[in-house]
Image (tube, helix red, strand yellow):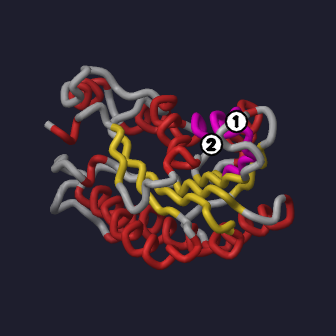
Amino acid sequence: MGKLDGKVAVITGGTSGLALAGAKLFVDEGAHVFISGRRQEALDDAVKKIGRNVTGVPGDAADLDDLDRLFDTVRQEKGSIDVLWASAGTGEQRKLGEITEEHFDATFGLNARGTLFTVQKALPLFNDGGSIFMTGSNASLKGYPEWSVYSASKAVQQAYARVWLAELKDRRIRVNVLTPGQVATPKQEELFDEATKRQFESLIPRGEMGRPEEIATVALFLASDDSSYVNGMELTVDGGTAAI
């Protein structure tokens, strides 16, 4: 028996990194998973890596038409949703004095606006007793220089969770935030040079980055009945970085 036997899960931004690791684990635990991503090549590769019980839907979580297409596909193929992991996100360094309107709008457009409409558009398909969680960032808990816009765009998710659980309590739908720290992913390789990676590793008590699989196991906890009494919480998975 898997922890997600017979469940339907939707993961936005599921083509790489921690979300892809989570999608693989969800399938191993019995779920059918829908993943979305902006790049068709990456989406096809992710579907191939997962191998079974997965549907890839191209789209940008910041685009409301693309979100409609994602959930229309879920409706047509499975009819309902048990788990939603709103994981699509973006972020780049900009220090105060160099922040542009375009940078602000792109970051908040996906991380804050996109997350909200992902959840809202999923709700008509949601089974009572389901689980919603969002990918936060420990940047919203620490004062990392040059990351103010990204940090703020992730901090809204804790507010979302607190309000939405109150609005969804009659349906017993749980809403939480999964907040990772520094994790070795392709996106990190794209953003950080070696010096920056070493600097971040120095902040982690064990001295090394997290692995996508370490985040995936916590995502499984939030998706499954193992976390049935966890609601409105921010679960920080950063090796203790934010605690010291």
Which residue is labeled 1 in the image? Answer: 2
Answer whether residue 166 is magenta in the image.
no
Say whether residue 142 is left or right of residue 107: left
| Label 1: which secondary element | loop
Q: Dividing the image into 4 quarters, which one contains the C terminus?
A: top left
- Toward the right, the furthest residue is 76
Residue 55 drawn at (x, y percent)? 78, 48
Compared to residue 162, the image places residue 229 above or below, namely above
As drawn, 152 above or below 45 = below
Residue drawn where x is 60% and y is 54% of the image:
12
Q: Give how far apart the Cα atoms at labels 1 and 2 are.
A: 23 Å
Left or right position of 153 against 82: left
Q: Residues within 10 Å of mark 2 (few under 14, many from 20)?
A: many
The residue nearer to you, when weighing 228 against 243, is: 228
The range drawn in magenta is: 20-35
Mark 1 is surrounded, within 10 Å at the Cα level, by few (under 14), some (14 to 19) or many (20 or more) other residues, namely: few
Identity, as a three-letter code, of the amino acid under mark 2:
Thr
Residue 89, visible in the rendered structure? no
In the shown orientation, is residue 6 left or right of residue 141? Answer: right
Query: Residue at the spot x=61%, y=63% of the render?
Result: 129
Q: Which quadrant of the rendered structure holds the N terminus?
A: top right
- Which residue is located at x 35 percent, y 59 percent? 154
Residue closest to the eye, 195 or 4: 4
The answer to whether 139 appears left or right of 13 in the picture is: left
Of the residues shown, which amino acid type is indicated by label 1?
Gly
- In front of the other: 64 or 126: 126
- Say which quarter of the image contains residue 108: bottom left
Residue 117: % across, % down: 55, 73
Circle 2 — which element?
loop
Q: Are marks 1 and 2 in contact (CB under 8 Å)?
A: no
Residue 11 location (% of width, % of height): 62, 52
The residue carrying mark 2 is 15
